[in-house]
Image (cartoon, rainbow, N blue to C red):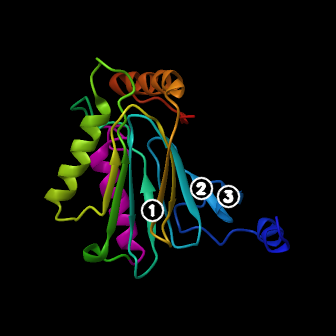
């Protein structure tokens, strides 16, 4: 590590955009920048030179930016849509695909992004257990159709397969870095995701679940 890296580590990150001040930002040494970890049901938007990270099993993340203004962000949704017709804060949250996409796109546009310029990359949607309902595939089909219906082009897709993904998105650079994790991680991911989906099917439950 050189002196420049040490100086950057000890500096405070640039101020977050309004509405995102509560996110914890940490120094990501591998990318020489600050980073934010997005949990299931969250989204984050920035105009700073920072990374947005997450870990995905059957969940999907959309990584979107305006390459002219540099504004960009990532969401992390769990299911395509609510399994209940009842309206609630829970069912209207970013845990569901349609809401997650609308929240992310609208926020990017609110802070200066232009719809016609948006660059969109999709990742996630893994199949964690063979022979069971493929929620990952449903998530990928949903987000693909959603973007087609809304008139967006998709720059790239890395989705499906049996592997969880470690994701790093750098909006200022337009780089989406995806590392496929060993399948031995599947059991833990499946347990966490299954529990969260059971909560979604039942009733609103407080707290956050982070996938590892």
Whether residue 12 appears in magenta in the rendering, the answer is no
Q: Is residue 70 left or right of residue 126?
A: right
Q: Check the image and report above or below for 145 versus 115.
A: above
Q: Which residue extends farthest bottom?
A: 68
For label 3, the residue is 30
Q: Residue at x 55, y 36 (%)?
A: 210
Label of residue 73 in the image? 1
For label 2, the residue is 36
Element type where label 2 sits in the image = strand
Q: Check the image and report above or below for 174 versus 147.
A: below
Q: Is residue 192 left or right of residue 98?
A: right
Task: Give x and y (percent) for residue 105.
Answer: 33, 63
The quadrant of the image that shows the N terminus is bottom right
Task: Give x and y (percent) for residue 67.
Answer: 40, 77
Residue 2: image quadrant is: bottom right
Disc 2 crowd rating (10 Å Cα; few below 14, some 14-19, many 20+) is many
Label of residue 133 in the image? none
Disc 3 crowd rating (10 Å Cα; few below 14, some 14-19, many 20+) is few
Depth check, front residue: 68 or 77 = 68
- Whichever of labels 3 and 2 marks the residue nearer the N terminus, that label is 3
- Whichever of labels 3 and 1 marks the residue nearer the N terminus, that label is 3
Task: Give x and y (percent) for residue 168.
Answer: 53, 54
Q: Residue at x 45, y 69 (%)?
A: 174
Task: Give x and y (percent) for residue 100.
Answer: 35, 50
Disc 1 crowd rating (10 Å Cα; few below 14, some 14-19, many 20+) is many
> Separation of disc 3 and disc 2 at Cα?
14 Å
User: Magenta segment range?
Assistant: 88-112
Q: Check whether the beta carbons of the residues at disc 1 and disc 2 lie within 8 A of each other.
A: no
Q: Check whether the beta carbons of the residues at disc 3 and disc 2 lie within 8 A of each other.
A: no
Element type where label 1 sits in the image = strand
Whether residue 93 appears in magenta in the rendering, the answer is yes
């Amino acid at each position: 590590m050189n002196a420049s890296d040490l100086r950057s580590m000890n500096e405070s990150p640039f101020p977050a955009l309004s509405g995102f001040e509560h996110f914890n930002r940490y120094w990501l040494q591998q990318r020489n920048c600050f980073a934010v970890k997005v949990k299931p049901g969250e989204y984050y938007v920035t105009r700073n030179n920072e990374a947005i990270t997450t870990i995905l099993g059957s969940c999907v993340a959309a990584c979107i930016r305006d390459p002219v203004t540099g504004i960009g962000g990532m969401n992390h949704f769990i299911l395509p849509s609510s399994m209940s017709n009842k309206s609630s804060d829970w069912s209207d949250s970013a845990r569901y695909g349609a809401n997650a996409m609308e929240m992310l796109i609208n926020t990017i546009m609110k802070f200066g992004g232009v719809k016609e310029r948006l660059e969109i990359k999709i990742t996630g949607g893994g199949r964690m257990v063979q022979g069971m309902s493929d929620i990952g595939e449903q998530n990928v089909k949903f987000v693909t159709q959603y973007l087609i219906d809304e008139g967006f082009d998709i720059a790239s897709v890395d989705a499906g397969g049996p592997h969880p993904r470690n994701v790093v998105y750098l909006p200022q650079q337009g780089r989406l870095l995806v590392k496929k994790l060993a399948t031995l991680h599947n059991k833990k991911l499946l347990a966490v995701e299954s529990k969260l989906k059971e909560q979604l099917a039942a009733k609103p439950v407080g707290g956050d679940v982070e996938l590892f």
